Image: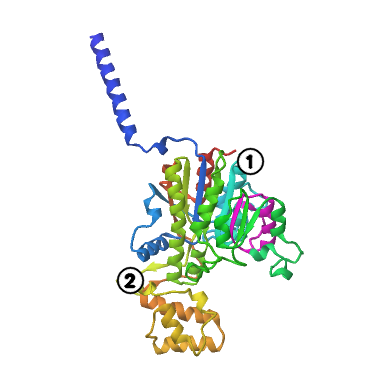
Amino acid sequence: MKIFKNKKLSLFLTSLLVLSLILASYIPSFAQTSKVKNVILLIGDGMGTEQVNLGRIYKNNKLYMDEFDYTGIASTYSADPKNKWVTDSAAAGTALATGVKTYDGAISVDLNQKPIETILEKAQKNKKSTGIVTTTRVTHATPACFASHNIHRDNENEIAEDIIEHGVDVILGGGKANFLDKNNNGKREDGRNLIEEAKGKGYKYVDTRENLKKVNDEKILGLFNNSHISYTLDRNLTVEPSLSEMTNKAINILSKNNRGFFLMVEGGRIDHAAHNNDPATMANEVLDFDEAVKVAYEFAKKDKQTLVIVTADHETGGISIGANGKYEYHPEILKKQNKSVEYLLDILTTSNYKTIIREELGINNLTKKEELDIVLALKKNDKDNLSRALVNTINTRSNTGWTTTAHTGVDVPVKAYGPNANLFSKHLDNTDINKLAVKSMKLK
């Protein structure tokens, strides 16, 4: 009887081993990986699930971020004592950069205004290369949170100094004015030229798309606009690179480090278009961001050691695909738009508005009320009301709904690919995204 039991146990253990080997063959290899060499964190500023959905509808196809193996969702609220539920980009950016919640306006400082170590700084301590890439000013809230510390996001001249002092290897985006003195077409009043100072610290400086293509130095500062990089619809392609081009250049440079790298990529102008309630411009920004996601995704598929995370800092605009009690949506209206509403505000006049609106928005049947609202705003040089009149015209025809021109407190999407991506497939807080990325790279 004893022999029989041993044979039975032996058979059971053998069967269990075979079953384990079979199951292991179906589990993606990255699920077994305990350490990640590189992390690429892509943040669509203001990009909620409906922004992603509109990008998908506009493209009439799946997005590259849809190819990711794991999808979750994240809460975005801050620790602001006045109003925690609807965050700003600074508090949300700090949460993503440090894993700590703070007050609105804070750039990687806590509620007591003390600096908090960021994931980028931890990567530097571990001899990894680092980069920030954005379509906003590089001193704007989200990128600033990863490479600087300040009590308020509006102190962009100080943030520019901090970013250079931090020695981030690749810095690409807009915001040239914060690096230059006011007598040199900049915003500084201290006489400093931070671009020249950066060169003295070993940076190669570029300010055009063509020069970005040519450069392969280990440290790059690229500033392609005095303020934000232009919307995709308005972009001057001889000067301003796409987000995917900047991302590709950053990865090519940072991946030379055998110890690995951390890269933050922001599609920052999704948020701005949503603030303006301009759906076509916003959809094009989502697609520009998704092309950068593609670059990171393709690199990670080949590299096998890179964790790619896609998320947002918050949602902006409270957009809805369909509105006004109607069961319909008309994306074809949006696809006729060639320029952003923001761009049109500077070129419309009382004499040309019909022609411009027909050529740039594809609308040739303005109602009498729409004409009256536009002309009245033009005569008063009231850009706020002019913008409102134009977006109302677009949104009415496409049946796009908006609840606000500000941020909302809704959860945002989280998508992940690569080693440890499975850890992101659940409901998270925005601080968890930082903690999981730090844990994955085993940063101290």
Query: Residue reaching furthest right?
Result: 191
* Residue 417 in picture, x, y percent from top left: 42, 46
Query: Residue reaching furthest front?
Result: 214
* Residue 189 in picture, x, y percent from top left: 75, 67
Look at the numbered disc 2 and give the secondary structure of its residue. loop
Looking at the picture, tell me which residue is in the foreground, 319 or 215: 215
- Are the two marked residues, 1 and 2, in contact with CB atoms closer than 8 angstroms? no
Q: Which of disc 2 and disc 1 is earlier in sequence? A: 1
* Residue 384 in picture, x, y percent from top left: 54, 79
Give me the residue at 46% from left, 80% from top.
390
Occupied quadrant, residue 300: top left
Q: Is residue 167 magenta?
A: yes
Label 2 Cα crowd, 10 Å radius (few <14 / some 14-19 / many 20+): some
Q: Which residue is mark 2?
A: 329
* Residue 323 in picture, x, y percent from top left: 36, 72
Q: Is residue 92 magenta?
A: no
Look at the numbered disc 1 and give the secondary structure of its residue. helix
Looking at the picture, tell me which residue is in the foreground, 129 or 16: 129
How is the model colour-coded?
A: rainbow
Give me the residue at 53% from left, 47% from top.
434
Highlighted magenta segment, given as a residue range:
147-175
Occupied quadrant, residue 401: bottom left
Q: In the picture, which quadrant includes the C terminus? A: top right
Give me the residue at 36% from left, 63% from top.
59
Nearer the camera: disc 1 or disc 2 = 1
Judge whether 207 appears above or below 437 on screen.
below
Q: CA distance from mark 1 to mark 2?
A: 51 Å
Q: Is residue 182 left or right of residue 66?
A: right
Q: Which residue is mark 1?
A: 125
Q: Amino acid at mark 2?
A: Tyr
